Amino acid sequence: MTDIRQMIELNKRQSSFYDSVCSASDYSENLSTNSITRLWASLRNAQIRATEKAGLKKVKRAKHLEWVQQSSGKRFLELGCFTGSDLTMDLAHQATSFVAVDLSPLALRDLEEKLKKQDLFDKCELVVGDILEVPLSETFDVIYAHGVLHHFEDPEPVFAKIHSWLSPHGRLILTEPLAINPFYRIMRSIYRPFQGDREWEWPFTRNTVNTLEKFVKFEDGFGWGRHSLLVSLLCGLPVIGNAAFKLYRRLLEKEQRMGLSSAAWQNSYITLLASPKTKLNAS
């Protein structure tokens, strides 16, 4: 297990990094990251554009809203919100009280302005800090973490924190990259030596998933990217782009229909709804 003090020190460096990229729309446009990181971000953006064109973003958002609305009018927490995720404003609207936590003070300053413009700030609390250190004494009915929990090499202390913050009937909603499929594990390992943010990028492995299952039960969700991700990179090319997109959409829909079957964990990404376990498994 990684020393928590070392994890906290690493997160301080991570805070500085995210302050530096706060003004850019993504890594591919930010000169504070290295050229390989920007290239990887450009490829990732191509994949994101394809998923949006195919409607995945709408499907995922609709599913997350469905899960959130089942706890409407209660206490919500968002971890790693940055300047606001795709669901931040919906969470603030739906909640009686909403707490958002992020390492970057600049990002939270931006989010504060967005909340004020929508007259939501009065019921919100923005907390600058490390998940491992923030002194949250209350419990929450929804905890939302989109692309956040893979930032910890040893996630068990974070999962334990989340479990302590969930009310008995609370719900954890998360979306994370996966490195269980051997192909994607190899691809990520090839990129890793050049990755500017590699110190805090740890896509979920089978061990990560097993650790998470000590604390929560998986209720619903789906993955995507097992076969569709590579095809998505072809969708923007001339001549073959239209044909590639038709294939991509079929593959993407097939991956989503698998739900939380064992095959879902072979995807490059997964989104999950989970509930807290009342009796924790022994370590």
Image (cartoon, rainbow, N blue to C red):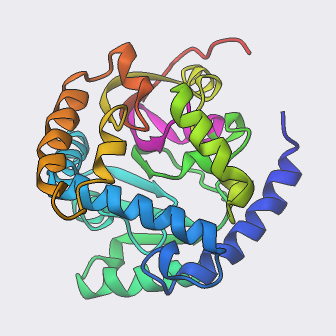
Is residue 215 found left or right of 196 in the rendered image? Answer: left
Q: Residue 155 location in percent, x, y?
A: 67, 38
Is residue 235 found left or right of 218 in the rendered image? Answer: left
Is residue 223 found left or right of 244 in the rendered image? Answer: right
In front of the other: 207 or 29: 29
Q: Is residue 167 magenta?
A: yes
Asked if residue 22 can be seen in this view, the reply is yes
Q: Taking 42 as reference, is 159 above or below it? A: above
Q: Residue at position x 20%, y 48% from top?
A: 56
Q: Residue 93 location in percent, x, y?
A: 22, 64
Q: Quadrant of residue 11?
A: bottom right
Q: Residue 73 location in percent, x, y?
A: 23, 52
Q: Residue at position x 54%, y 21% from top?
A: 213
Is residue 103 found left or right of 227 in the rendered image? Answer: right
Region of the chain picked out in magenta, as a range: 159-180
Q: Taking 210 as reference, is 112 above or below it? A: below
Q: Residue at position x 80%, y 57% from top?
A: 8
